[in-house]
Image: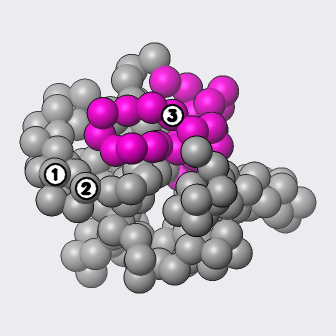
Amino acid sequence: MLVGEQPGNDEDRRGKPFVGPAGRLLDEALEAAGIARADAYVTNVVKHFKWTPAGPRRLHKKPSAREIGACLPWLENELAVIRPEVLVCLGATAAQALLGRQFRVSVERGRIVETPLAPRAVATIHPSAVLRQQSTEDRRREMAHFTADLEVVAGLLNGKHR
């Protein structure tokens, strides 16, 4: 089960999670890590797209703690139904909502974490963080780190990590 922050503009318009640029990057990283997207349940902590207008564009705005709290019962029900073997938190908002406010993706990314929500959990960056890198080299490097984090997940799914 992969959990992101909230739908982006494309996701909001299409009604499906991770179908925009970040979703395409997620698909690429999952494939490189050996995880079939079809085998993963993909969702978000917050179920609506919070945005501010910028001319014809709708720009992402970070959800508030109140919005996260309001959506948590929905996410908890998804967890109860899916009962994931591995929970993957994509980005700080998802990690802190599910693994605790003190959790720091920058410090703990790619590490196997204990949680009552799933037998194992791993947190990593949100794929949009790769897209925000300034240079091609920075994007390549961050994509390699992101893929390596997902390879940890693949190892858990294939019984290579216990």
Report, in whole angstroms, how far the alpha carbon at label 1 lies from the one at label 2.
5 Å
- Quarter of the image with the N terminus is bottom left
Q: Which residues are magenta?
A: 103-126
| Residue at (37, 23) in percent of width and height | 100
Image coordinates of residue 39 in percent, x first then y, are 41, 77
**Residue shown at 73% from the left, 56% from the top:** 148
Residue designated by label 2: 83
- In magenta segment, residue 61: no
Q: Earlier in the sequence, mark 1 or mark 3?
A: 1
Total residue callouts: 3
Q: Residues within 10 Å of mark 3 (few under 14, many from 20)?
A: some
Identify the residue at horizontal 67%, vertical 69% (top origin).
33
Could you tell which of marks 3 and 2 lies nearer the N-terminus? 2
Left or right, 94 with reference to 143: left
The answer to whether residue 85 is visible is yes
Identify the secondary structure beneath mark 3. Answer: strand
Which residue is the site of mark 1? 80
**Considering depth in this image, is 102 or 46 the residue closer to the camera?**
102
The circle on residue 113 is 3
Distance of label 1 from label 3 (alpha carbons): 19 Å
Q: Which residue is situated farthest in the right direction here?
A: 137
Vertical position of residue 4 compared to residue 35: above or below? above
Q: Position of residue 129 (x, y in %)?
A: 61, 51
Going by the numbered disc 1, the residue's amino acid type is: Ala
Mark 2, Cα crowd under 10 Å, few <14 / some 14-19 / many 20+, is some
Q: The residue tagged with tag 1: helix, strand or loop?
A: helix
